[in-house]
Image (spheres, rainbow, N blue to C red):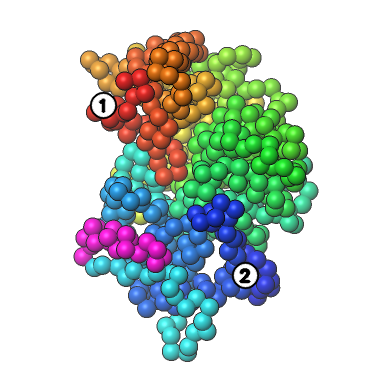
Amino acid sequence: MLHGRASMRPDDVAFTFTEYADDPAGVAETVTWSQLSRRTANVARVLARHGSAGDRAVILAPQGLEYILAFLGSMQAGMIAVPLPLPHRGSNHDRVSAVFTDTTPAVVLTTSAVAGDVGAYVDEARMQIAPTIVTVDTLDLDGTPSDDEPAVAAGEAPDIAYLQYSSGSTRLPTGVMISHRNLQSNYEQLMRSFFAVPHIRSTAELTIVSWLPFYHDMGLVLGVCAPILGGHPAKLTSPVAFLENPSRWVRALAENPQAFSAAPNFAFELAARKTRDSDLAGLDLGGVLGIINGAERVNPATLERFADRFAHFNFRDNMLRPSYGLAEATVFVASGIYRESADEARFDSNELSAGRVARRTTGGTALVNYTLPQAPTVRIVDVETNRECAPDVVGEIWVHGENVAAGYWSRPADEQQCFGATLADPSPGTPAGPWLRTGDLGFVHGGELFIVGRIKDLLIIRGRNHYPEDIEATVQGITRGRVAAISVPENSTEKLVTVIELKKSAEPDADATRWLSEVKSDITSAISNAHGLNVEDLVLVPPGSIPTTTSGKVRRSACVDHYRQDQFDRLDA
């Protein structure tokens, strides 16, 4: 696809990456389709000297065009790409070492700016055969290859395109084997879901806008693969650039024709709160095609706040596209369209905890609705019987389709049990298998899909099930910050603890103490009223204190460990 784009549209810009590290206004670097094709081939020729088809090529580099070249060059050389996050200096390198041990890479691709650190990671991994470190930015990327250079692997390339490693929130990182077919199928499914809707008439000028990290499944597919598969230009930057100034993302949406983007729920909160009207002076969001809200649970209140915040810049509610997916299904499973005019979907929290569905007009749990996709196929399944659940019954979400990966890299059979599941007595038209068990709980109501939480994250307090996301959403309605609801064993029972990130008050100490006391009182009352629960401990901490995965999801098991070891820096200590 890449080389085809280069032959048909050689001088069209494919990717633009804007760096803000040295200039707050941003320094943009572009690459055309022909440049990208040539540079990819040159990277591949170098890699072919250091490995064979099917070898693994780990990518440890800063976000930038070199990362994209490393990814594409690895696949061009017939190697299996392994995109990873570059560890922060001083952070624990266990995750990188675990992936090195898992993949035994032949090469590690990086840039000269961080090559010293990457070399140290390689040394610490203590592999029997050390991989070759290739610094992409020092290669002769635009040179003309000579006839005696190694040929690029072609027909012998493996079915696996890349390994998508998990964030390792509850276990060692696990690599999902994504094939070229998985990627192509999921892209087609995604396009049908997002753009085959009445309010989108054309995608002729679609521009992909993204700051998501390239090592994350949504950032890799949206920011790197989709532009090539669809032939659309991409305007990219880094997660750091977004976090430093969230208005950069909103400006990019307004400045690029038919912008299409994606972000986790927390980013919508940040952008709505941190973008000033003056940041968008003279700009209009009316041309935005859509923004995916995914990668973590979608909060309906966040969608409403974002739509309201930018309505006077011609942002329309139906531009918001809540979405559900997971790496084991490449990335995408289902999406919806947000409409402020629609009745809010609220359900009785106690009934949901018991596995049943009862609609409410007020109170309870607010959930986002998703359209049941034709492809992939989705079913709600009873985990005890492996039979399909009736509508309005909570069960595990199972997925079937060509986007579902074959399994985890190098993992034994007992760690592959989420793949290849079989339905008992499937309904007419429903395949018996193979199915992906997602580990997510959901239900079908009124012909639409709703997602309630992860099976492994269920809180069991005094014998009753509670979804931590529900409690966290209640608290976020007050604090607007990151929250972790956890259960902690104590004296043969479980106590509810909530860890809440708050900005420190600028008030004098006495006023700050009163403010913290009022916040605690408001939160305790809200949880009691909404969920019928007593909070045993409220842990108020500064922003950035709650452990998260590389994609920004709360690591609840790590929160339990931090709490039990008294490692949180409490604001009210």
564 relative position to 367: left or right:
left
> Where is 279 relative to 490, above or below?
below
Which residue is depicted at the point 39% across and 11% down? 534
Outermost residue to the bottom: 147
Residue 126 visible in the current orientation: yes
Q: Which residue is mark 1?
A: 566
Q: Nearer the viewer, residue 397 or 562?
A: 562
Q: Amino acid at mark 2?
A: Trp
Which residue is depicted at the point 28% across and 58% down? 121
For mark 1, does the 10 Å Cα neighbourhood hold few (<14), some (14 to 19), or many (20 or more) residues?
Answer: few
Q: Which residues are magenta?
A: 111-128
Outermost residue to the front: 508
Q: Earlier in the sequence, mark 1 or mark 2?
A: 2
Distance of mark 1 from mark 2, alpha carbons?
Answer: 53 Å
Q: Position of residue 535 (x, y in %)?
A: 38, 14
Determine which of the numbered discs, if any, sits on residue 33 in the image.
2
